């Protein structure tokens, strides 16, 4: 009897326990949303892990990623700088009938704390200034403007011109470039816009008419506002926004020094009419030896240079070059341009000075263009001559003079135009076998063809430019006096006649009856 009562009691207790449990579960579902009824199959709950540590649960991956994005926004909003973190986020799916889900606020906060704990580096918002291939990183755009303004102020722009950063309309991306404005013109424009609102139509026309008349009147020397009239940058400038590590930023003071300090840079100098190596050295303030060392085409100070040749020279230039124009006044002695009288019956090698020059004096207003401290151009805009210069007058020939060639093919150069054996050797020699063809070095008329004492068999030829050539120690003569010959025409055979030490050809060129070094006149 007792056992029956006990068994009945347990059954009643078990039923009551089950009912109570069901009620508790229902109450949790109704009043505690975080207690989640899971689907019947598949991954029904997701454990969120950061850096391998479980920080909460989400009903789905999408819910967790939403919280992660919000945590990142919270971290980014704490600073204007760009923050980089190094965290690994993973989601582990679990199959459960019921589970406790972290609230969105709680999961977001835990993610934010983990992100903050794992900050790898912070990048500051900055600006990169690019000048050709040179770059420098500076903290703010205002400092960029200060740097560029400092480059201008070095050449007298302070209080007259200001630099602004503007969007480069030629670029698709947000790239800034520079715009330089005259402060005076800017103020005048603002004043003009202000006056335009109050100025009547007739008054505006009269003002414009007066302005036009002022522009047409010829200025006197005192009417010019001397000094800086225009300024700009001589290099391409680009400015872009960037997020950079603090260690890569340059202070404003250091950037100004780097960008504006002059340093040696290679550049090209184009040879102009009248240039010599010594003259180029003076113009560029570089020694002749240094110019020769920088240019492989130059052997020594006597190397020939021609108009249009390009030479490498070094010039002191800053990273950012500044171009400017200044109006300046000066007085100077000047020379008039040479005047030429052209004589078609003379060769170009002939000239006679018909009038000697003398310098004049003048007052000048000039517009001078500079690149940094070097003058790149000059335009005289007003001139007053106080003493006229007398020009040099030169009569020159226009005919092309004869040319001179080597009188034999081959041969070994055996003696030059120099002192030899105590006496002057007044020609050049080529050792060659007897019987080698000897040619006329230039066209002309044979003046002598025969025996010439120490010359042995010799030929003299007179040329149209007044010069004479001589060919000595011949074995056979093939022309006669009075005969006209052409350049390259065979006139004799080489030999070993006269005062000779072996088979060779002796060759001379005479100008005004005096022997000169033939090698300086032969092509």
Image (cartoon, rainbow, N blue to C red):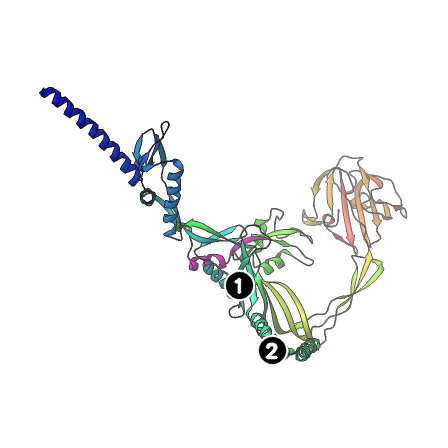
| Residue 193 falls in image quadrant | bottom right
Whole-Å distance between the Cαs marked 1 and 2? Answer: 31 Å
* Location of the N terminus (image quadrant): top left
Q: Please name the residue that numbered disc 1 is placed on.
A: 163
446 and 146: which one is in front?
A: 146
The residue range painted magenta reads 250-267
Numbered circle sitting on residue 84: none
Q: Is residue 213 magenta?
A: no
User: Which residue lies at the image location 64% right of the left edge and 70% below the top edge?
Assistant: 366
User: Which residue lies at the image location 20% right of the left edge and 30% below the top edge?
Assistant: 16
Say above or below: 451 vs 464. Answer: above
Say above or below: 457 vs 124. Answer: above
Q: Please name the residue that numbered disc 2 is placed on.
A: 198
Say above or below: 168 vs 361. Answer: above
Which percent across, then down, holds residue 492?
84, 40
Q: Is residue 320 visible?
A: yes
Which percent across, then down, holds residue 456?
80, 43
């Amino acid at each position: 009897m007792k056992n029956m009562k006990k068994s009945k009691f347990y059954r009643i207790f078990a039923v009551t326990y089950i009912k109570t449990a069901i009620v508790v579960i229902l109450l949790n579902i109704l009043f505690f949303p975080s207690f989640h009824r899971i689907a019947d199959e598949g991954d029904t709950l997701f454990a969120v892990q950061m850096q391998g540590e479980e920080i909460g649960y989400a009903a789905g991956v999408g819910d967790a990623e939403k919280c992660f994005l919000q945590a990142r926004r919270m971290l980014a909003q704490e600073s204007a700088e760009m923050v980089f973190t190094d965290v690994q986020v993973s989601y582990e799916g679990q199959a459960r009938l019921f589970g406790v889900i972290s609230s969105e606020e709680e999961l977001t906060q835990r993610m934010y704390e983990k992100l903050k704990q794992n900050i790898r580096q912070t990048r500051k918002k900055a600006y990169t200034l690019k000048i050709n291939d040179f770059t420098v990183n500076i903290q703010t755009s205002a400092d960029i403007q200060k740097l560029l303004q400092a480059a201008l102020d070095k050449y007298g722009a302070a209080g007259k011109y200001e630099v602004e950063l503007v969007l480069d309309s030629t670029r698709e991306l947000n790239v800034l470039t520079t715009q330089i404005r005259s402060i005076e013109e800017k103020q005048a424009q603002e004043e003009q816009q202000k006056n335009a609102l109050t100025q009547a139509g007739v008054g505006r026309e009269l003002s414009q008419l007066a302005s036009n008349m002022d522009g047409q009147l010829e200025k006197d020397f005192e009417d010019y506002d001397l000094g800086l009239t225009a300024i700009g940058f001589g290099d391409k400038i680009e400015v872009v926004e960037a997020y950079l590590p603090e260690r890569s930023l340059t202070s404003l003071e250091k950037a100004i020094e780097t960008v504006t300090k002059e340093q040696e840079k290679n550049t090209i100098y184009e040879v102009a009419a009248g240039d010599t190596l010594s003259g180029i050295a003076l113009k560029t303030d570089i020694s002749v030896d240094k110019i020769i060392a920088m240019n492989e085409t130059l052997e020594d100070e006597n190397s020939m240079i021609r108009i249009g040749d390009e030479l490498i020279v070094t010039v002191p230039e800053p990273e950012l070059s500044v171009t400017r124009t200044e109006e300046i006044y000066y007085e100077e002695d000047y020379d008039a341009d040479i005047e030429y009288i052209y004589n078609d019956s003379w060769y170009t090698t002939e000239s006679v000075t018909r009038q000697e020059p003398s310098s004049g004096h003048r007052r000048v207003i000039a517009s001078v263009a500079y690149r940094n401290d070097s003058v790149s151009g000059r335009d005289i805009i007003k001139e007053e001559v106080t003493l006229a210069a007398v020009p040099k007058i030169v009569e020159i020939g226009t005919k092309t003079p004869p040319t001179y060639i080597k009188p034999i093919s081959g041969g070994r150069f055996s003696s030059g135009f120099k002192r030899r054996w105590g006496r002057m050797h007044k020609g050049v020699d080529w050792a060659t076998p007897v019987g080698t063809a000897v040619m006329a070095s230039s066209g002309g008329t044979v003046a002598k063809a025969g025996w010439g004492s120490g010359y042995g068999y010799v030929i003299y030829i007179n040329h149209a430019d007044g010069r004479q050539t001589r060919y000595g120690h011949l074995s056979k003569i093939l022309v006669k006096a009075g005969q006209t010959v052409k350049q390259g025409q065979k006139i004799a055979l080489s030999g070993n006649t006269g005062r000779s030490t072996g088979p060779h050809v002796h060759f001379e060129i005479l100008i005004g009856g005096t022997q000169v070094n033939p090698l300086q006149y032969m092509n």
